[in-house]
Image (tube, helix red, strand yellow):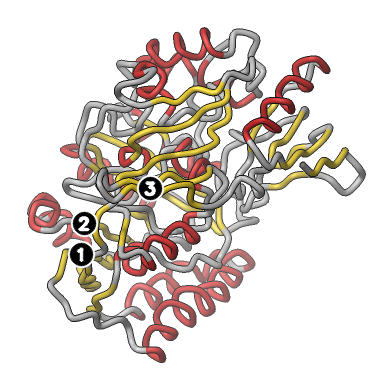
Amino acid sequence: MTETYATATSTWRNWAGNVTARPVRAVSPASVAELAEVLRRASEDGLRVKPAGTGHSFTAAAATDGVLIRPDLLTGIREIDRAAMTVTVEAGTPLKRLNTALAREGLSLTNMGDIMDQTVAGATSTGTHGTGRDSASIAAQIRALELVTADGTVLRCSPDEHADVFAAARIGLGALGVVTAITFAVEPVFLLTAREEPMSFDRVTADFDQLVAENEHFEFYWFPHTGNCNTKRNNRSAGPAAPPGRISGWVEDELLSNGIFQVACSVGRALPGTIPAIAGISSRALSARSYTDIPYKVFTSPRRVRFVEMEYAVPREAAVEALREVRAMVDRSPLRISFPVEVRTAPGDDIALSTASGRESAYIAVHMYRGTPYQAYFTAVERIMTGFGGRPHWGKIHTRDAAYLSEAYPRFGEFTAVRDRLDPDRLFGNDYLRRVLGD
């Protein structure tokens, strides 16, 4: 086990740089037993504990002034069970490493989000999701998990063992204990054909229900200050594999989506008046294309331009109306928005604090380039989303508190009851959890 203590340079920062913390010490346990000892010592010292993955949350969910647990030594696949079609993986394993290892074994997750830099525990604990007509978030693919609670007890949770904890801990916000291993459902690796196509805002909103119904995975991006969108449809394919060409893929995914976009955002931050013109150019720069590859290479994209983000889940039937209200708000305001607005969907699931808990959902995500004032834009969008009973993504910027969230989540009380039992002294508490879950 490695352990470091606070120094003048030991400030922890998240990926976006909008959250910082100064833990007393940072610890990298190499086993479940070492982790239990870390928790025992922290409790004796009167210090709170938070595990932190790669810092891809925009909220302070992982921030602590006590003991920061780094999961970098808790990595790797424990077991692949081909009879049950599951994989059990250590909690600190990055999704990228899991996906490449599964592909070598001829296996795949069914669905995932659009980045894979997070650890598996960080991604699931905050409700990371992709888009899907029938397949839900990464957490919904969990079949069992291992959790070390405040008193050092190791719980193996599944629908058949500690079922009430399992119902809560799949998206546990780090509030119930430290997740040390996760068992995911997997399936034989398959091919997806992605079809990316520009489409007008009016057409994509008019045909939204049909586009969702006709495709296994549908999402689109609307470019503020324009009537232009870019759509993406992913569907299973018999093959053969036909990945993007080396040069054309680099042009689309690196030069345009990262390199030139980075320059455009920098110009827009310095000269906000140029943003509408830049948006018009950017929205027309990406052309239609199709390609076929294994799932993680289709679902995910490199994200090198840093930003801050807010995302709300609304009932799927409210998606178009909510998005139209966002567009009307932007059009009548002095705001200048350089990042596109992302829209995705998910089926309902049975996880207590999932943003899709008990209802089919649509996700509307807004972003601002890092270093650009975002409060006015996010506040205006949040006002719209809460008007539709929206649920904020746990790992993305929002201002909601326990009073609001207890009404938005029918099973909120179920989660907090499990928390009260597993962590009555709030060893895993921090300011963020106090706000969103209450004392």
Residue marked by disc 2: 217
Q: Which is more toward the observer, 358 or 243? A: 243
Examine the rendering and report whether any part of residue 325 can be seen. Answer: no
Residue placed under numbered mark 3 in the picture: 87
Distance between mark 3 and mark 2 Cα atoms: 24 Å
| Quarter of the rendering occupied by the N terminus | top right
Q: Where residue 211 appears, x then y in whole percent?
A: 12, 57
Q: Residues within 10 Å of mark 1 (few under 14, many from 20)?
A: many
Viewer-nearest of labels 3 and 2?
Answer: 3
Query: Of marks 3 and 2, which one's residue comes earlier in the chain?
Result: 3
Which numbered disc, 1 or 2, marks the residue that appears first in the sequence?
2
- Residue 21 lies, in percent from the top left, at 75, 38
Q: Are marks 1 and 2 in contact (CB under 8 Å)?
A: yes
x and y percentages locating residue 202 in the rendered image: 17, 60
Q: Amino acid at mark 2?
A: His
Give the CA separation, mark 1 to mark 3.
28 Å
Q: Amino acid at mark 1?
A: Arg
Asked whether residue 299 is in view, the answer is yes
Q: Residue at x 11, y 49 (%)?
A: 209
Q: Disc 2 on helix, strand or loop?
A: strand
Which quarter of the figure has residue 415?
Answer: top left
Q: Secondary structure at mark 3?
A: strand
The residue at 43%/50% (across/down) is 366
Q: Which residue is mark 1?
A: 233
Count of marks overlaid on the render: 3
Q: Residue at x 39, y 58 (%)?
A: 114
Residue 66 in the figure: left or right of residue 276: right
Say left or right for 73 vs 304.
right
Answer left or right for 113 relative to 176.
Answer: left
Q: Is residue 351 above or below residue 278?
A: above
